[in-house]
Image (cartoon, helix red, strand yellow):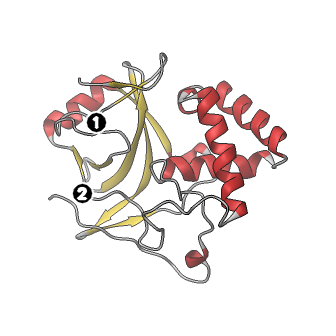
Amino acid sequence: MIVDSINTAVRSYAGDAPDHVLRRHGIYILVGKDGARRVYRFLCDDGAYVWMMEIGQRINHGIKFHVPPKTTKLRVRWKAMHVEQLLMSGRLYLANGCGIPHQMPVEPIPEGVDPALDKKRLLVSTILRYWGYRVVTDPVAYAKATREACNFYGVATPTGRAWLEAHLFYGEHPNATMSQTWRRGSRVKTHFYGND
């Protein structure tokens, strides 16, 4: 597999890789044995295992996305060999799109415009800068990193963890932790068309 090194402990795949190689932050559809199609975002791998986050379900010609999680409950860890078999058999394939709601600006909201967003970005970037993807692969590192960062920035640990999970859910988009006022009072379905 072609890889792009992120840090010494964990590897992540390059964005220009062939379709049988996982792409960093890529959206993948897994066709279950029952025909159900679950949608995942690739987070990272370490050579032996691959970590993904379930972000929705394929319905007709679109994807119904989950609400971003506040915990690690939507993350999955699969053996790398299993993922390779799924890719080669066509049961796991790359979807078109980036999985970002149309209400979320594509361009980063400039620093200083939204102080709450700035604080969320700072906390998440601190965690990832010092801990890297160990916060995905190692539950002990996740607990320690989020606890220490939240203590430092004066944020409740569950709140900080929710910010980190939203950041991962939206593929580390700069606006991933923005306030999602569009979710209030309605059931949101964000769709994009896949490649099947």
Q: Secondary structure at mark 1?
A: loop
Which circle's residue, 2 or 1, is located before the other in the chain?
A: 1
Mark 1 crowdedness (10 Å alpha carbons): few <14, some 14-19, many ≥20? many
Q: Nearer the viewer, residue 167 or 80?
A: 167
Asked whether disc 2 touches disc 1, contact meaning CB atoms under 8 Å apart, the reply is no
Q: Secondary structure at mark 2?
A: loop
The amino acid type of the residue labelled 1 equals Leu
**Which quarter of the rendered picture does the C terminus lie within?**
bottom left
> Percent x, y for residue 120?
68, 53
Quarter holding residue 1: top left
Image position of 49 with respect to 40: above or below: above
Q: Residue at x 50, y 59 (%)?
A: 108
In the rendered image, the residue lying farthest to the top is: 8
Whether residue 91 sits left or right of residue 139 in the image: it is left
> Percent x, y for residue 78?
39, 31
> Percent x, y for residue 82?
29, 28
Q: Which residue is mark 2?
A: 96
Image position of 117 with respect to 148: above or below: below
Q: Residue at x 42, y 74 (%)?
A: 189
Q: Nearer the viewer, residue 28 or 128?
A: 128
Q: Which residue is mark 1?
A: 22
- Which label belongs to residue 30? none
The amino acid type of the residue labelled 2 equals Asn
Marks 2 and 1, how far apart at CA: 13 Å
Q: Residue at x 55, y 78 (%)?
A: 182
